[in-house]
Image (cartoon, rainbow, N blue to C red):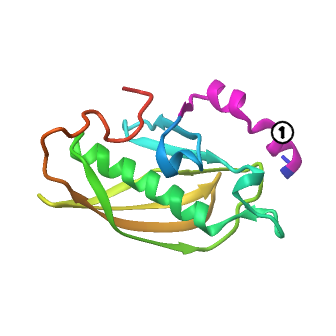
């Protein structure tokens, strides 16, 4: 399939028809989304983002590295959230290695993998891909927060499947 044909197919309607569910998030992350979620065969969340003009390096027509980092934070953070079962956490460390590009109209996705969980930390990694092509690898550490009085319940990240 040509890139133009793929870009025409990849839209919100097509994603919804193929099992992806859109989730709108607030704050800074809401400026990047909407993000797309679905569960893989083993029940783990896979996170996606349809690359739009607003996500691009305007002079190149390619996905901006800052968007890739934000996406990695959201995607790997979803893996940490799943491992914590609803406990709150924050990103303590995040790094990415860029190995290819994504273009406007392409759909990037990531299936986060929890490498290790301790009482206070969750270690997560993942590949960010366009179809079968890896565009970046990322890994990070999430710090588990102590429950506090007045904490907002149910804020462990968007999951339209719950």
Q: Position of residue 2 (x, y in %)?
A: 87, 49
Which residue: 77% across, 52% down?
Answer: 53
Which residue: 56% across, 32% down?
Answer: 22
Q: Secondary structure at mark 1?
A: helix
Q: Position of residue 55 (x, y in %)?
A: 69, 56
Does the segment drawn in magenta span residue 110?
A: no
Q: In screen coordinates, is 90 left or right of 37? A: left
Q: Considering only vertical position in the picture, is 112 above or below 93?
A: above
Q: In screen coordinates, is 105 left or right of 109? A: right
Q: Position of residue 112 (x, y in %)?
A: 41, 53
Q: Position of residue 84 (x, y in %)?
A: 22, 46
Front-most of residues 17 and 54:
54
Magenta part of the chain: 4-23
The count of marks equals: 1
Front-most of residues 42 and 83:
83
Q: Residue 158: name its quadrant.
A: top left
Quadrant location, the C terminus: top left
Q: In screen coordinates, is 94 left or right of 120? A: right
Q: Residue 128: name its quadrant.
A: bottom right
Does the segment drawn in magenta span residue 18?
A: yes
Which residue: 43% across, 36% down?
Answer: 41
* Prevailing secondary structure class for the magenta stretch in the rendered image: helix
Residue tagged by mark 1? 8
Within 10 Å of disc 1 (Cα), the crowding (few <14, some 14-19, many 20+) is few
Front-most of residues 148 and 3:
148
Q: Considering only vertical position in the picture, is 85 above or below 131?
A: above
């Amino acid at each position: 399939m040509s890139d133009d044909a793929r870009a025409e197919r990849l839209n919100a309607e097509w994603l919804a028809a193929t099992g992806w569910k859109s989730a709108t998030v607030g704050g800074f992350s809401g400026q990047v989304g909407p993000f797309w979620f679905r569960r893989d065969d083993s029940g783990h969340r896979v996170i996606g983002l349809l690359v739009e003009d607003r996500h691009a390096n305007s002079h190149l027509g390619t996905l901006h590295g800052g968007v890739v980092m934000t996406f990695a934070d959201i995607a790997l953070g979803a893996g940490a959230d799943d491992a914590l079962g609803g406990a709150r956490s924050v990103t303590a460390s995040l790094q990415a290695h860029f190995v290819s590009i994504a273009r406007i109209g392409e759909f990037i996705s990531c299936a986060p993998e929890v490498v290790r969980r301790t009482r206070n930390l969750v270690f997560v990694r993942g590949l960010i891909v366009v179809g079968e092509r890896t565009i970046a690898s990322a890994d990070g550490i999430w710090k588990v927060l102590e429950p506090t009085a007045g904490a907002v319940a149910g804020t462990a990240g968007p999951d339209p499947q719950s």
